[in-house]
Image: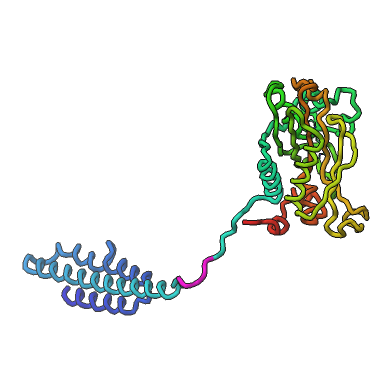
């Protein structure tokens, strides 16, 4: 019995020494110390021993078991320490490496243009107001001197939702709503930026959805010269002090008289080039004196009040300012395009 136990210890210690990894060690533990292992077997067979032998063998068996367990544990610790060492070596972090750059978003080019336009008009005392994109037929057309049978309603083919509701075709209804709200007894000096919708086929210069900024100034004694002064100020601040403006007669159903404004071409300075189509001038917006019927419908007495209004397309203005050749660039959101105008 004694010899058996001694040789078991030797054998187990030999196996521990030979173990190459944690799995090998576990194998040794199971086969020597497990429930079906030889030591357990010895302890089970103790019943057959004499009274004198029993405590001696029992003690020895326990000692052998402890010795094997200790050998296994020590080896296990050594393996674990080696493993940790290896990990520390291979998973070393170089804290001096520069970090990976974080992609930061910024405002869209159109947002920047609209903000810039807003700031210039706020500087001239205008208030920024917004309104619904789903409009009533009344505010989108009727209140702007476009009755049901008006040919201009065909001109701006619209997205109708019901007979009475449509996606607004311009931001003018925001201004008509404001005049109504002010009940014809105080001045209105506002701009209204926002999305508008028309049933157009998209191409390089047309989009079924685009942006508009309109302006309105209604007060006593507002004249065409006020419109010209405000727009001249805007053009010079937005496009550059050296730019000239000119007004040409035009037509809109909601203004009378109506004008279109051009700015001098910065490429050829009036000599004529391909950008200005050899005219020296580039059209940037439309406007005029608010039609007396529009004032009347909104509750302003056209004998007491007068006003000017204008409208521009920020996409067109951005295209002119930066030489962008296709309006679809604003909506397809190719990050390489947008990045060029990212001021962040
Ligand atoms: C253009 C021309 C224009 C207006 C918009 C307006 C609004 C009210 C009354 C009268 Cl409430 N007029 N807006 C007037 C003339 C021209 O826009 O070419 N826009 C892109």
Above or below, 176 against 2 in this view is above
What's drawn in magenta, residue-wise? 95-99
Any part of residue 203 in sight: no
User: Residue 129 at x, y = what percent?
Assistant: 67, 34
**Can you name the residue that lies furthest to the left here?**
52
Residue toward you, 119 or 93: 119
| Vertical arrangement, residue 202 with respect to residue 49, above or below | above
Left or right of 150: which side holds 197? left
- Of residues 127 and 212, the one drawn nearer to the viewer in this rendering: 127
Residue found 50% across the figure and 72% down from its top: 97
Query: What's the coloring here?
Result: rainbow
Residue at 89%, 26% (x, y): give it.
150
Q: Quadrant of residue 48?
A: bottom left
Residue 324 in view (yes/no): yes
Quadrant in the picture for residue 147: top right
User: Residue 179 lies in magenta, yes or no?
Assistant: no
Instruction: Say which quadrant the C terminus sits in.
Output: bottom right
| Picture coordinates of residue 81, whole percent (x, y) | 33, 73
Residue 80, horizontal then vertical, whole percent = 34, 71
Residue 195 placement (x, y as % from top left): 73, 39
Most foreground residue, 163 or 265 = 265
- Can you say whether 220 is above or below 64 in the image? above
When the figure is inspected, residue 189 is found, relative to residue 303, above or below; the finding is below
Question: Can you tell me which quadrant of the image ligand 1 is in?
Answer: top right
The N terminus is located in which quarter? Answer: bottom left
The foreground one among 325 and 72 is: 325
> Would you say the magenta stretch is mainly helix, strand or loop?
loop
């Amino acid at each position: 019995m004694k010899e058996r136990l001694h040789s078991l210890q030797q054998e187990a210690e030999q196996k521990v020494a030979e173990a190459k990894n944690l799995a090998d060690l576990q194998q040794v533990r199971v086969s020597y110390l497990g429930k079906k292992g030889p030591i357990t077997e010895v302890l089970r067979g103790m019943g057959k021993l004499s009274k004198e032998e029993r405590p001696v063998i029992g003690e020895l068996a326990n000692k052998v078991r402890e010795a094997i367990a200790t050998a296994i544990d020590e080896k296990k610790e050594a393996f674990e320490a080696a493993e940790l060492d290896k990990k520390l070596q291979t998973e070393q972090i170089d804290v001096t490496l520069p970090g990976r750059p974080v992609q930061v978003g910024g405002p869209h080019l159109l947002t920047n243009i609209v903000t810039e336009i807003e700031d210039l008009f706020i500087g001239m005392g205008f208030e920024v107001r917004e309104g619904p994109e789903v409009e009533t037929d009344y505010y989108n057309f009727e209140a702007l001197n476009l009755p049901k049978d008006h040919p201009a309603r065909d001109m701006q083919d619209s997205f109708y939702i019901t007979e009475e509701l449509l996606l607004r075709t311009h931001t003018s209804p925001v201004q008509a709503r404001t005049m109504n709200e002010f009940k014809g007894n105080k001045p209105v000096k506002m701009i209204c930026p926002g999305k508008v919708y028309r049933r157009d086929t998209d191409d390089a210069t047309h989009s079924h959805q685009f942006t508009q900024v309109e302006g309105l100034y209604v007060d006593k004694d507002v004249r065409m010269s006020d419109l010209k002064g405000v727009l001249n100020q805007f053009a010079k601040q937005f496009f550059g002090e050296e730019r000239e403006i000119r007004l040409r007669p035009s037509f809109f159903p909601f203004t009378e008289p109506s004008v279109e404004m051009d700015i001098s071409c910065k490429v050829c300075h009036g000599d004529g080039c391909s950008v200005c189509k050899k005219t020296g001038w580039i059209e940037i917006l439309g406007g005029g004196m608010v039609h007396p019927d529009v004032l009347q419908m909104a509750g302003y007495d056209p004998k007491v009040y007068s006003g000017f209004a204008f409208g521009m397309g920020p996409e067109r203005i951005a295209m002119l300012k930066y030489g962008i050749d296709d309006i679809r660039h604003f909506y397809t959101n190719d990050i390489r395009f947008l990045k060029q105008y990212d001021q962040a």
